[in-house]
Structure formats: structure tokens, C-alpha cells
Image: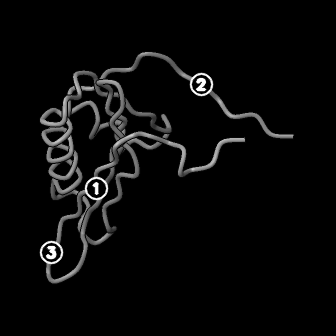
Amino acid sequence: MVFYEEIAANTIYCSLMKDGKVAACASAAIEHGYMLLQNVVVSPEYRGQGLGKEVCESLIAQAKESGARHLYLQVVRTDAAAVDLYLKLGYEKVYTYWYMKK
């Protein structure tokens, strides 16, 4: 069994404030030269303003400074806004996967 305190990945977080509150945030895990972009969230009232792109670009820059040479993420293919954001950031589809449940 693996416990979270045993995970050695360096994790960084980014939030963007607007009108005195968090408008967008994201996190990234960095390990062995790879950065996993994850948990990108933009408050509904601020969507469509480029804030998701801004927090992602900030995390990517920080990850590169920390030694990341490869970037990756997972996205639900039906989330058109997220797919569009990641394409704008230069990501490309490598493979698809699906979840199974019992």
C-alpha cells in the first residue's frame, strides 16, 4: 500500500486573484524531468477571459525553471473548453483511454 507522504514529486500551485477572490487556479507535479499539469479550474464568472491559460503558462514556466523538460496532462475529451485551452498551450493528443465501472 502506498501512502501520500511516500510520493516524492515536487508539487507547485498557482492561483489568480480577480476582484478580491480566486478566479483561477491549477497545480502541477514535477518528477524526473516530467511535469503533470492538473486541477485547472476557472470560476464560471471569469471563464472566457484567458485566465486558465495564464495560470497554466505560469505553472509551465515555473516547472521549466525547476527542471521539467516534458509536460503532460489528462483531459476528458468531451470537455471542449479544456481541450481548446490545452491545444492553445501547444499540447497534442497522444492517446485516449476510458474508465470502467462495475
Marks 2 and 1, the one that precedes in the sequence: 1
- Label 3 belongs to which residue? 18
**Residue 21's quadrant in the figure?**
bottom left
Q: In which quarter of the image is the N terminus?
A: top right
Number of other residues with Cα within 10 Å of mark 1, as a class: few under 14, some 14 to 19, many 20 or more: some
Residue 93, which numbered label?
A: none
Marks 1 and 3, the one that precedes in the sequence: 1
Q: Kindly identify the amino acid type of the residue bearing the numbered disc 1.
A: Tyr
Q: Give the residue displayed 17% in from the left and 72% down from the top.
A: 17
Front residue of this view, candidates 49 and 99:
99
Front residue of this view, candidates 13 and 39:
13
Marks 3 and 2, the one that precedes in the sequence: 3
Residue 25 x %, y % = 29, 60
Q: In this view, does 32 lie to the left or right of 53?
A: right
Residue reaching furthest right?
Answer: 102
Q: Give the residue displayed 59% in from the left and 25% down from the top.
A: 97
- Label 1 belongs to which residue? 13
Q: Kindly identify the amino acid type of the residue bearing the numbered disc 3.
A: Lys
Identify whether 27 is placed above or below 68. below
Q: Kindly identify the amino acid type of the residue bearing the numbered disc 2.
A: Tyr
Asked if the residue under mark 2 is in contact with the one under mark 3, i.e. CB atoms within 8 Å, the reply is: no
Q: Quadrant of the C terminus?
A: top right
Residue 83 x %, y % = 36, 36
